[in-house]
Image (cartoon, rainbow, N blue to C red):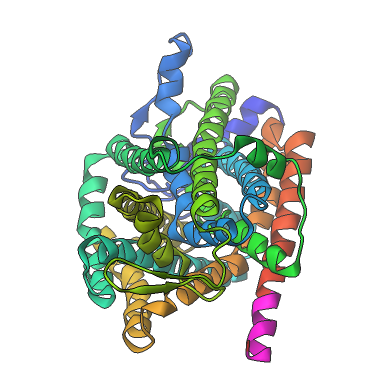
């Protein structure tokens, strides 16, 4: 089969929602956004073509800066200073590899990962795969709910259970955005990501009380290793919170928002531009995660078992069981001598929760339509997902108190870890197959790095799950 024949097979899938080759109706990913962004001709200037393809990876990148990442990065910096900075870099590199492969699948086959699983795997696998995806998305949404609620609580002193309920209204925001088109969604996400980046830039480089030691940071990046089993556990948490399974489904769908011709040169060009988009977006995500860890290292490291009395009389105890996100907010202002530090921290956290919420909803739409070919109203889809996150959050924060937030965040990461292999393995199987991908099957570079990343992430995530289960059995 030559390249032109192979690429011709993607056109019916990307065409209008008439019955496709499998006899199903409406097989396009995110139909309201599919092929809505025009791509300049090959003769157009390079920067114009690059601008047309920039966007999908930035939507995906917010999943790498969500509140789950904040919890693990702050704990890593507070407990081990810069020693786990190399873990943040390694996990970001593996995420870049997996997202590049995900974008390639969508561009070449005209299918997102959920559609590919439905069409290429046995019919009996659809239900368990879909259910696992929905559980993972609900768990991820739980982290976004908690992140946004904590930010509202810290900024406006709204009781946490009420702040959790307020986050339900962001369904209205998402519905308004989807009506206004893909480019506006991407622009708003870019603003939120820029807000996070700007807040941390000010925290680290503008506030005079923070002086990062770049030599020490460089040494930490180039000196991988674990001094203790406890450090390994935190490292596994950082990696488990970094590569999100729903992002692999979402990215393969978002790239189809660009109207790319089906000929080989056009697809090859689209792969190249989307690779650049992915590297740029996830490099920003790495810098943000590194900044979170570095700020925690500069301000909180070395305060183990210390007790700090705040100006309002509240007492903060630094120990292994503390809620690191809340402790960071409460202590940044007195430790750095400026209230701006804590405000910037909370604003960035709110931007993180809201941006991740938008992409999580889009991912839910992709997996439901891809696996099951079910289409329901976007508001109903959003309401169901948000209720699945809000109900346990409200119940636990009401009955177990605000100190249970960290436990909920950890639980959400464990659920994501269970789903991750179910997304990575089929993605690599499909994109490594010349039957499915033709001349665009993974070459030796992506093949080696992709499978190595997949196996390492799977082993570490399963290790994290095993440690959690063992701790629960031991009653620790």
Image location (x, y in percent) of residue 72 = 55, 61
In this rendered view, identify the residue nearer to me: 397 or 305.
305
Q: Residue at x 66, y 41 (%)?
A: 216
Give the side of residue 60 with respect to residue 177, left or right: right
Give the side of residue 361 with respect to residue 263, left or right: left
In this rendered view, identify the residue nearer to me: 251 or 436.
251
Image location (x, y in percent) of residue 356 = 39, 54
Q: Is residue 137 above or below residue 58?
A: below
Q: Residue at x 61, y 63 (%)?
A: 237
Q: Residue at x 60, y 62 (%)?
A: 79
Q: Residue at x 39, y 46 (%)?
A: 18
Q: Is residue 135 above or below residue 7?
A: below
**Magenta: predominant secondary structure element?**
helix
**Does any portion of residue 15 appear in the rendered image?**
no
In the rendered image, residue 280 lying in the magenta stretch gets the answer no
Q: What is the count of numbered marks? A: 0
Give the side of residue 319 with respect to residue 449, left or right: left
Q: Which residues are magenta?
A: 466-475
Q: Quadrant of the C terminus?
A: bottom right
Instruction: Give the quarter of the image for residue 440.
Output: top right
Image location (x, y in percent) of residue 111 = 52, 45
Give the side of residue 392 with respect to residue 312, left or right: right
Q: Quadrant of the N terminus?
A: top right
In the rendered image, residue 474 lying in the magenta stretch gets the answer yes
**Does any portion of residue 203 appear in the rendered image?**
yes
């Amino acid at each position: 089969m030559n390249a032109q024949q192979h690429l011709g097979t993607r056109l019916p899938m990307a065409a209008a929602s008439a019955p496709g080759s499998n006899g199903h109706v409406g097989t396009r990913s995110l139909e309201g956004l599919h092929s809505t962004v025009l791509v300049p001709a090959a003769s157009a200037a390079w920067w114009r073509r690059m601008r047309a393809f920039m966007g999908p990876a930035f939507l995906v990148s917010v999943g790498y800066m969500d509140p789950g990442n904040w919890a693990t990065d702050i704990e890593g910096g507070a407990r081990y200073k810069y020693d786990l900075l190399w873990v943040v870099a390694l996990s970001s590199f593996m995420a870049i590899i997996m997202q590049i492969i995900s974008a390639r699948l969508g561009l070449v086959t005209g299918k997102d990962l959920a559609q590919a699983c439905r069409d290429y795997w046995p019919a009996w696998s659809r239900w368990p795969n879909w259910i696992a995806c929905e559980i993972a998305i609900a768990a991820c949404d739980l982290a976004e709910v908690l992140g946004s609620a904590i930010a509202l609580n810290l900024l406006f002193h709204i009781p946490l259970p009420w702040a959790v309920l307020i986050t339900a209204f962001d369904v209205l925001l998402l519905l308004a955005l989807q009506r206004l088109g893909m480019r506006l969604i991407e622009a708003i996400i870019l603003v939120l990501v820029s807000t996070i980046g700007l807040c941390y830039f000010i925290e680290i480089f503008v506030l005079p009380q923070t002086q990062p030691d770049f030599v020490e940071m460089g040494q930490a990046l180039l000196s991988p290793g674990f001094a203790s089993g406890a450090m390994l556990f935190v490292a596994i948490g950082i990696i488990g919170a970094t590569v999100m399974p729903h992002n692999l489904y979402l990215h393969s769908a978002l790239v189809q928002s660009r109207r790319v011709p089906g000929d080989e040169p056009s697809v090859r060009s689209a792969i190249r531009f989307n690779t650049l988009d992915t590297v740029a977006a996830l490099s920003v995500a790495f810098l943000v995660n590194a900044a979170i860890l570095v700020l925690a290292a500069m301000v909180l490291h070395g305060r183990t078992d210390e007790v700090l009395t705040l100006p309002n009389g509240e007492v903060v105890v630094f120990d292994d069981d503390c809620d690191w996100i809340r402790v960071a907010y409460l202590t940044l202002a007195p430790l750095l001598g400026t209230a701006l530090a804590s405000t910037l921290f909370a604003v960035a956290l709110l931007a993180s929760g809201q941006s991740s919420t938008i992409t999580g909803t889009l991912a839910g739409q992709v997996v439901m339509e891809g696996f099951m070919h079910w289409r329901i109203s976007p508001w109903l889809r959003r309401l169901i997902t948000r209720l699945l996150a809000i109900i346990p959050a409200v119940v636990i924060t009401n009955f177990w108190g605000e100190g249970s937030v960290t436990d909920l965040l950890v639980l959400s990461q464990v659920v994501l870890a269970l789903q991750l292999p179910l997304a990575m393995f089929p993605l690599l199987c499909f994109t490594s197959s010349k039957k499915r991908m033709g001349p665009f099957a993974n070459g030796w570079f992506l093949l080696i790095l992709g499978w190595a990343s997949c196996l390492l992430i799977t082993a570490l995530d399963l290790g994290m799950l095993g440690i959690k289960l063992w701790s629960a059995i031991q009653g620790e």
